[in-house]
Amino acid sequence: MLDRKLLRDLWLMKSQVLTIALVVAAGIGASVAQLSTYDSLRWLRASYYEAARFAEVFADVKRAPKAVERQIAAIPGVAELESTVVFDATLDVPGVAEPVIGRMIGLTDARQPQLNRLTLRRGRFIEPGQSREALVSEAFAKARGLRPGDRLAAILNGKREELRIVGVVLSPEYIFSARGGALSDDRSFGVFWMDREYLASAFDMEGAFNHAVMRLAPGASEAAVIAALDRLLEPYGALGAHGRDEQLSDKILSQEISQLRTLAMIFPTIFLGVAAFLLNVVLSRQVATQREPIAALKAMGYGNLAIGLHYLKMVLVIVFLGIVAGIAIGAWLGYYMTGMYTAFFHFPRLTYRVQPWIPLLASGISLVAATAGALDTVRRVASLAPAEAMRPPAPARFKRMLLERIGLGGLLPPRARMVIRTLERRLLRTVLTTFGIASSVAIIVAGTFWGDALDYLIRVQFYDTERQDVSVVFTDPVAGSARFDIEHLPGVLYAEAARSVPVRLRAGHRSYRTAVLGLPPDRELRRLLNADLRPVPLPAEGILLTDRLAERLRVKVGDRIQVEALEGNRAKRDVPVVGLVDELLGISGYMDIRALNRLMNEGDAISSVGVSLDEAQAQSLYARLKEMPKVATVAIKASLLQSFQETTARNVLFYTTIVTVFAGAMTIGVVYNSARISLAERAWELASLRVLGFTRREVSGLLLGELAVELALAIPLGLWLGYLLSVTIVALTHTETFSIPVIITPKTYAYAALVTVVAGIVSALIVRRRVDQLDLVAVLKTRE
């Protein structure tokens, strides 16, 4: 009989069953999606690295003879070694006006490398002796529509050479495709593999190498190998050996996985916490409305255990529906999110898995929260004597509400006083419902502020800080007069020189490999700003550090650090820290270009020129830059921004949509169930008011007015909680290469409030229909 009652009860409260299951599904779906994406991405990285034999130590030098390879191989701990030549070159891609940067990597005997093995996606490998054949990275090939058989030109050491693409490949060394910054740029940066001998010959590197990668023997000390490499390669212009943790692609990927892990802990915890909280509250109140049926069952002889199991089954059915839906939704979302990461980071395949512990953990939390709340209520109701339980609960003691006690009650109309009195009489319920709605608002704010933050990052970094349209980078440091050569090219409105030097900064036992950028004192294109976006002066002596670099080195203004140049004369100087710069991208130092050149003993040298461009003559400028032999690369800001915005906008939009849908489901769940239970508890009271002459609209207004007050209280509270949650997320996902600012615009707050109001209105309209359909006779006979 109890099972038939269970089915009948579930059918009668089907709308509540659905909304509660939605809340559970939202919590479990978010948990499964994020945790499985994080787990899958880690698994993908590990399996790809292993299959591709990704190197563990990397070393770049200016030029080292191949004979040094034997000495490197003899370093204790080095198990495998592979060297090659690597150069950046300007490309002339058919149909592409602007110069494109190509990284040329030599393949010994045109064969597959033993370390950092390539994955052939299309076409074939280059054939021995075919010096003009090349393999191209898949990301660049897709971005520029290149296929095997296509041809393009590369400026190799000032000489234009035509290359024929024979294959499209992936490399574990370029999972994240970027030349040196924190932003991916598949449209302007491509990686090419070609015959090593031919490439070495083009750059006068016969019998030499400038890039070496190694795998370590089991148990070997990475730090010891790196230290030995630095000592060995220093005479050959070593730029400093490093492990995987400083390899750009792995560094960016690891930071992304680390951020994903943080988000996978934060959002699922919040979703599950809110879902468990709402589940507990809603089911407790739902079971409480069954007071009279429980008493009737006791009067018929059913024991407490049988009654408790009956309601436990009800809870389990509802939660089970949410679990099934949540796992299905979470697995689909996780697959989609993993696919986005796989495409962004250029893995060879999409492999997605849901480890059993993920849905089990999420389901367990929901089940415990739901059963705990429901069973506690059943226990309290079942402890009553049947005769007492079959009577309606004693009416609450009347007392004047707070507004009346302070003399303001007369300012409100009677119906408003009735609404406020009800809310005040059930204060705990009001607080819990308000907090539940506020939690949903906070989740929406924290899930959608990323768009605001990225817009701010782009505006500050690419328009307020880096104001040049084009950056022209030379193959080697050149005389300062080269700036005037660039300035006289067509379309150049203004040109500003800079000198970049790779360095190792040391402060006590802490060190960091980065670059120091030398800037002119009267610069206009490259501004240095503090946290308030005010210009920071660049003193004639000393060094400015980005705040994240100062934090890493644990130094402050006034301290002295050692600057060790990793090129040229490899000078070492102690310089004072004269100020801090707040930059959102990168982690580097800045000096007056004259002071930096004095440190390098190079006179008036520059390594790049920033250009302010007349867009109308951009094509002419690009054509001339492609022909200049000393130009190594040309970075075009518009192209970089376009690539960045295309990828991030899609990901942010997807993430925002998902968070909004989940949070909206939670809002509907808490608002609708709160209203439905209030209706069930107050049906007799509302029916009596109808009989006394109140209209349907007035009666509905009493019930929905309570919801309106709770929404009005919850929205500002939720917006504030959303800000705090955003600050927490940013603090926990802090990385070295870029910093996400906590920027939340009024548009985002308005969006979160609007979604909540719409969810509340939808819930209210459904409840309003229920109120209108009240059977007055049946309800009023209930008390008799």
Image (cartoon, helix red, strand yellow):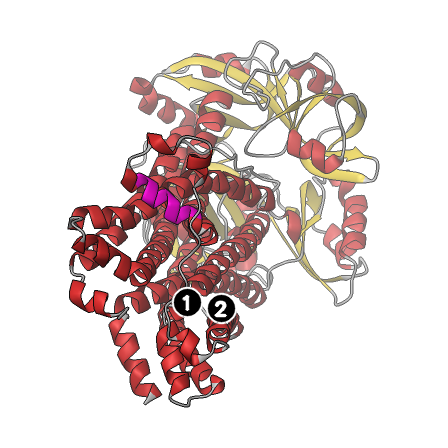
Marking on residue 283 = 1
746 in relation to 781, above or below: above
Q: Secondary structure at mark 2?
A: helix
Residue 193 falls left or right of residue 502: left
Which residue is denoted by mark 2 in the rendering? Answer: 373
Density class for disc 1 (Cα within 10 Å; few <14, some 14-19, many ≥20) is many
Disc 1 residue type (three-letter): Leu
Residue 742: x %, y % from top left = 51, 35
> Are circles 1 and 2 on residues that touch, CB within 8 Å?
yes
Question: In this view of the protein, can residue 521 be seen by the observer?
Answer: yes
* Residue range (magenta): 416-424
Q: Secondary structure at mark 1?
A: helix
Kindly give the residue lying farthest to the top in the view shown: 522
How far apart are the alpha carbons under marks 1 and 2?
A: 7 Å
Residue 498: x %, y % from top left = 58, 20
Q: Earlier in the sequence, mark 1 or mark 2?
A: 1
On-image quarter of the C terminus: bottom left
Residue at point 79%, 39% (across, down): 510
Density class for disc 2 (Cα within 10 Å; few <14, some 14-19, many ≥20) is many
Residue 750 falls left or right of residue 690: right
539 in relation to 588, above or below: above
Disc 2 residue type (three-letter): Gly
Majority SS type along the magenta span: helix
Residue 284: x %, y % from top left = 44, 67
Between 590 and 34, the one lying in front of the other is 34
